[in-house]
Amino acid sequence: MSHVDETLAAYESVAARYDELNARLDTARLVDRYVEVVERYGSGGRRLLDAGCGTGRSSAAFRERGFEVTGYDLSPAMVAMARRRPGAEGIRFQVGRLQQPPPGLTGFDVVACVDVPMAYLTDTDQLRRALAAARDQLTEDGVLVFDLSTVGHYRRAFGVPTIADRGDRYVAWFAVSPRIEADAVVVTQFDLFERAGDGWERVSMRHVQRHHSDRTVRRVAEQAGLRVVATRGLVGTSAREPADEDDHDRILYVVRRSG
């Protein structure tokens, strides 16, 4: 099974439960960090493409903040959830990959990739293709904004096996990769145990991501005809400057066409 197939299988298996499992992420506050940099570095236009939109949480949040939103995601099951989301009525959701998006998506003032979808691009060629696709989706003065997990976050979050008690369910996660290094693939195992009658139902999934260092992001962006114009470190959903690969959880990138 390819890394893309593993990613698709993981999200298809939990689409109906995804919002519950990911409830601790304050998507609205994360979107606020996006809006802050868009207002500072963007053109002022409000057409926004939510690439890797998942169940549409970020799409609905962007629309609440006055953007005209279109979204797409790799997983048909996640897209189906997005189409049923309250507050997302009228948003057009499609199925597609970051490096091979649905046709006809052009003329956007903002392309946003919220909550690390680009981490699932497990080599630099896939990253380059996704960045090039985003470049083609932007207006001349539009901005691409995305976040990626830091190597420090991967080590803190997955370096030690963890079990979370969520009441009627338990979630366990750990890194399968023997070492977590910069610019390397990180394979993580998630096991969800839910009560089912007198017993328990188990759902297992593997997530295959890659840490893309700041140096790599900047180099590959240049290859795709883009340039990084700003970064922010994220600790939870709070912004910090300057961004730090060890201390912060994510780096938020603001990127423009280079010519």
Image (tube, rainbow, N blue to C red):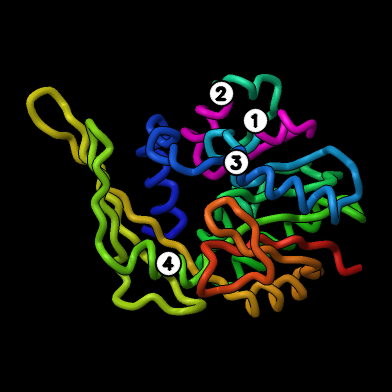
Question: Does the CB distance between marks 1 and 2 fall below 8 Å?
Answer: yes
Q: Taking 64 as reference, is 36 above or below it? A: below
Residue corresponding to mark 1: 60
Mark 2 or mark 3, which is nearer the start of the sequence? Answer: 3
Q: Residues within 10 Å of mark 3 (few under 14, many from 20)?
A: many
Q: Residues within 10 Å of mark 4 (few under 14, many from 20)?
A: many
Callout 4: SS: helix
Mark 3 or mark 4, which is nearer the start of the sequence? Answer: 3
Q: Taking 173 as reference, is 11 above or below it? A: above
Mark 1 or mark 3, which is nearer the start of the sequence? Answer: 3
Of discs 4 and 2, which sits in the foreground? 4
User: Which span is picked out in magenta?
Assistant: 60-83
In this rendering, the count of numbered labels is 4
Please, what is the three-letter code of the amino acid marked with disc 3?
A: Cys
Marks 1 and 2, how far apart at CA: 8 Å
Callout 3: SS: loop
Left/right of residue 110 with respect to residue 92 in the rendered view: right
Marks 4 and 3, how far apart at CA: 22 Å
Residue corresponding to mark 2: 85
Left/right of residue 31 with respect to residue 15 in the rendered view: right
